[in-house]
Image (spheres, grey):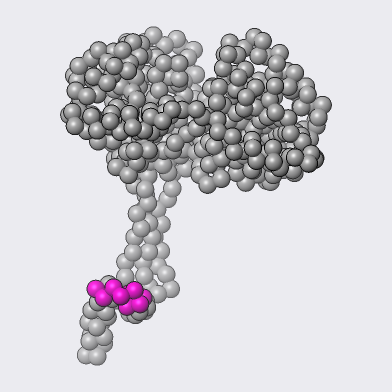
């Protein structure tokens, strides 16, 4: 059974601090191995990538076979059942429509000094998308990473999707086609991250890498950051549900299990002021676990990382939620809008009993790539802005420079940066000479 905490208990703060500080990841220290892999790819390029693919994915291929040819993609996509393809296309359309509203606008204006200022937004040239292979191969992740990049205007999108033992997920290839991915490579792990970051003879480098992965992928992303941008370093999935009296306990139970089934390190938390509901949900979770296909994963996740927190009221529940800053937050309450106004920190908020988090994973429209491990306190989920950058613009007229330039000279002098001051004062002197004449 998961831990149960009561906010009115004398030891609540101590137990909550322990829960907040618990380390849920047990990934081995792989940094040294990843550093060696990256160095190998930088030194030997395609040959190293091919050898590492044979070693880790049990797929003996040559450098010329790293990229998946179009006819192979076509054949895989043809295997996708019509119903799944239609669902994929509906999801893509909704994700596309949502993200188009995020596209920022350029600005230009003239201030009181007569200076013209502003900014403009431009897309990065190339993005790399990492898609895990094997059991964690999710076509929904392809859509969520690729569509914002395409909406942003990224010119080239390369995808690395490992195929252990040569087995590809046709729906992943279909998602790539629907989302507009330009290139697909059958490689994974740290070697794929290195290839996308530094480039090889057959894989051109990208400017930013996005997408989830295992400990090796995460470590590689940390190491290449700076050479390229990265989306985030995501930890195990998590959900927090705030529920009040009268909610359906079975619905809440399956919502909690929807994250628990991802990973034994995932975390599911129920926060409620109603003790009766808390008990009913706990019992419903146990019933569902008896028949759940992934109970071997969901069971340990719920037992080892799950929690039920009993609060005095919903206002206190909102405050508790903010301390977790959960990746996913469900508000299964009578007035979700009112409660939402009290929440400051969450990756994504799902309003009302008829909005399960799973809708957000697939078809809702907002992105499901979200901050984990309390990082929603200072970061946001993946968006169009992750694939764009802002360039500031400034234009001084002679009058504007005359008005604000002397202050710049003063500040440059105070910092002992003589040439900085001279670059402004030289112009001011010319302007003054012109006025004297």
Left or right for 154, reference 346: left
Q: Residue at x 39, y 25 (%)?
A: 131
Looking at the image, which residue sits at the far bottom?
436
Q: Residue 429 at x, y = what percent?
A: 24, 83
Q: Quadrant of the N terminus?
A: top right
As rendered, which of 228 and 84 lies closer to the eye?
228
Name the main secondary structure of what is drawn in magenta. helix
Give the image quarter of residue 115: bottom left
Q: Residue 383 at x, y = what percent?
A: 46, 39
Q: Residue at x 37, y 64 (%)?
A: 117
Give the image quarter of residue 269: top right
Q: Residue at x 60, y 19 (%)?
A: 300
As rendered, which of 233 and 395 lies closer to the eye?
233
Q: Quadrant of the C terminus?
A: bottom left
Left or right for 200, reference 127: left
Q: Residue 387 at x, y = what percent?
A: 38, 41
Q: Residue 412 at x, y = what percent?
A: 32, 74
Residue 130 magenta-highlighted? no
Looking at the image, which residue sits at the far right?
276
Give the image quarter of residue 11: top right
Q: Residue at x 56, y 17 (%)?
A: 297
Is residue 181 at least partly visible in the picture?
A: no
Left or right for 129, reference 287: left
As rendered, which of 129 and 279 lies closer to the eye?
279
As rendered, which of 350 and 288 lies closer to the eye?
288
Magenta segment boundaries in residue numbering: 411-419
Is residue 374 at least partly visible in the picture?
A: yes
């Amino acid at each position: 059974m998961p831990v149960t905490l009561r906010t009115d208990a004398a030891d609540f703060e101590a137990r909550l601090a322990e829960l907040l500080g618990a380390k849920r990841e047990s990934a081995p220290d792989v940094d040294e191995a990843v550093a060696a892999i990256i160095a190998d790819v930088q030194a030997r390029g395609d040959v190293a990538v091919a050898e590492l693919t044979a070693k880790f994915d049990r797929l003996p291929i040559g450098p010329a076979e790293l990229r998946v040819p179009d006819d192979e993609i076509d054949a895989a996509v043809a295997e996708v059942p019509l119903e799944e393809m239609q669902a994929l296309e509906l999801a893509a359309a909704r994700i596309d429509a949502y993200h188009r509203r995020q596209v920022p606008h350029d600005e230009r204006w003239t201030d009181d000094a007569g200076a013209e200022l502003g900014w403009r937004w431009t897309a990065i040239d190339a993005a790399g998308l990492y898609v895990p292979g094997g059991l964690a191969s999710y076509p929904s992740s392809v859509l969520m990473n690729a569509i914002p990049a395409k909406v942003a205007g990224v010119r080239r999108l390369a995808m690395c999707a490992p195929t252990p033992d040569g087995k590809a997920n046709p729906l992943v290839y279909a998602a790539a086609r629907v989302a507009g991915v330009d290139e697909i490579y059958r490689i994974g792990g740290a070697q794929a991250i290195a290839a996308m970051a530094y480039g090889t003879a057959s894989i051109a480098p990208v400017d930013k890498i996005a997408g989830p992965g295992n400990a090796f992928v995460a470590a590689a992303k940390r190491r290449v950051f700076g050479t390229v941008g990265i989306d985030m370093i995501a930890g195990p999935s998590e959900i927090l549900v705030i529920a009040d009296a009268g909610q359906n306990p079975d619905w809440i139970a399956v919502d909690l299990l929807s994250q628990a089934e991802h990973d034994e390190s995932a975390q599911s938390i129920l926060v409620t002021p109603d003790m009766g509901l808390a008990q009913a949900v706990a019992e419903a979770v146990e019933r569902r676990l008896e028949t759940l296909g992934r109970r071997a994963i969901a069971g340990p996740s719920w037992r080892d990382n799950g929690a039920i927190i009993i609060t005095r009221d919903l206002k206190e529940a909102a405050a508790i939620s903010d301390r977790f800053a959960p990746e996913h937050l469900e508000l299964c309450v009578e007035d979700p809008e009112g409660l939402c106004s009290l929440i400051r920190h969450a990756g994504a908020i799902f309003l009302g009993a008829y909005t399960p988090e799973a809708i957000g994973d697939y078809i809702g429209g907002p992105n499901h790539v979200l901050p984990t491990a309390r990082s929603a306190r200072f970061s946001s989920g993946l968006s169009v802005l992750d694939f764009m950058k802002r360039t500031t613009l400034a234009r001084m007229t002679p009058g504007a420079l005359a008005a604000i330039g002397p202050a710049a000279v003063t500040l440059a002098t105070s910092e002992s940066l003589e040439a900085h001051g001279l670059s402004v004062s030289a112009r001011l002197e010319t302007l003054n000479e012109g006025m004297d004449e």
